[in-house]
Image (tube, rainbow, N blue to C red):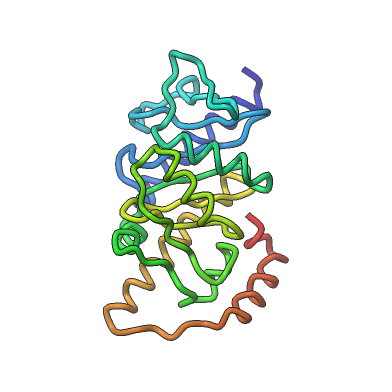
Amino acid sequence: MTADELDKRQAIIDACRRMNALGINQGTSGNISVRHVDGLLVTPTSVPYETMTADQIVFMAMDGAHAPDRKPSSEWRFHRDILKSRPDVNAVVHAHPTYCTILAIMGMEIPPVHYMIAAAGGDSIRCAPYATFGTAELSEHAVRALEGRLACLLDHHGMIAIGKTLDKAMWLAVEVETLARQYHGCLQIGRPSLLPSDEIERVRQRMAGYGLSEG
């Protein structure tokens, strides 16, 4: 194992533990992947983050092949398919943050209630249609919902954030949960006014200078 691969494996473990520490995930319900050479490194299934070790992270080829003694996350398919379809992306973070999941259960997208939605790549954070976890159908929905975007919700499920680096994907996952919490709070009072699409595009262009809307 090269030093680069070991660093990536440890970064995945650290990010998993950080997800739970930040409260954007519970238990082992989330999963993370990072592009590596001609495949990806992805979290194993049902392994507590506290005891996870670098050798347990699964290397998977883009055809889905992996060592028979290593079982990847049940959601490996959308991790693989997102990385295959998005050469601009090197990391995928999937979690079940409370407010994102509330909106996802309701089948609701996050509209432009705050200018920071531009960090996710557009004027909304779409909600992909429901499909059973781990299926090709769910993967297809997720890839479609992420077209032109860096984050999406999954109906009755959770959220996905992607980025050029794992740090950027993690940052965005936290930001999307903040936006979901803000939108949820607004809905307790009434229907919030929305920012126009042209303003979100202006913000997105300005953010690009800070590296915030480029994955």
Question: Farthest residue toward the right?
Answer: 209
Q: Residue at x 62, y 44 (%)?
A: 85
- At horizontal 47% and vertical 63% (from top left) the residue drawn is 126
Q: Residue at coordinates 53% horizontally, 54% vertically from top-left?
A: 144
The image quadrant that residue 199 belongs to is bottom right
Q: What x and y, as percent, mark residue 122?
A: 58, 67
Looking at the image, residue 43 lies above or below residue 176: above
Furthest residue to the left? 188
Residue 111: x, y in percent? 46, 73
Q: How many marks?
A: 0
Q: Is residue 116 left or right of residue 39?
A: left
Q: Position of residue 64 (x, y in %)?
A: 53, 26
Residue 88 in the image: x percent, y percent? Answer: 68, 48
In which quadrant of the rendered image does the N terminus lie? Answer: top right
Say if 84 sits above or below 120 in the image: above
Residue at the front extreme of this rendering = 137
Of the 4 image quadrants, the one containing the C terminus is: bottom right
Seen at 54% across and 55% down, the residue is 146
Foreground pick, 84 / 39 = 84
Which residue is at the far top? 69
- Which quarter of the figure has residue 62? top right
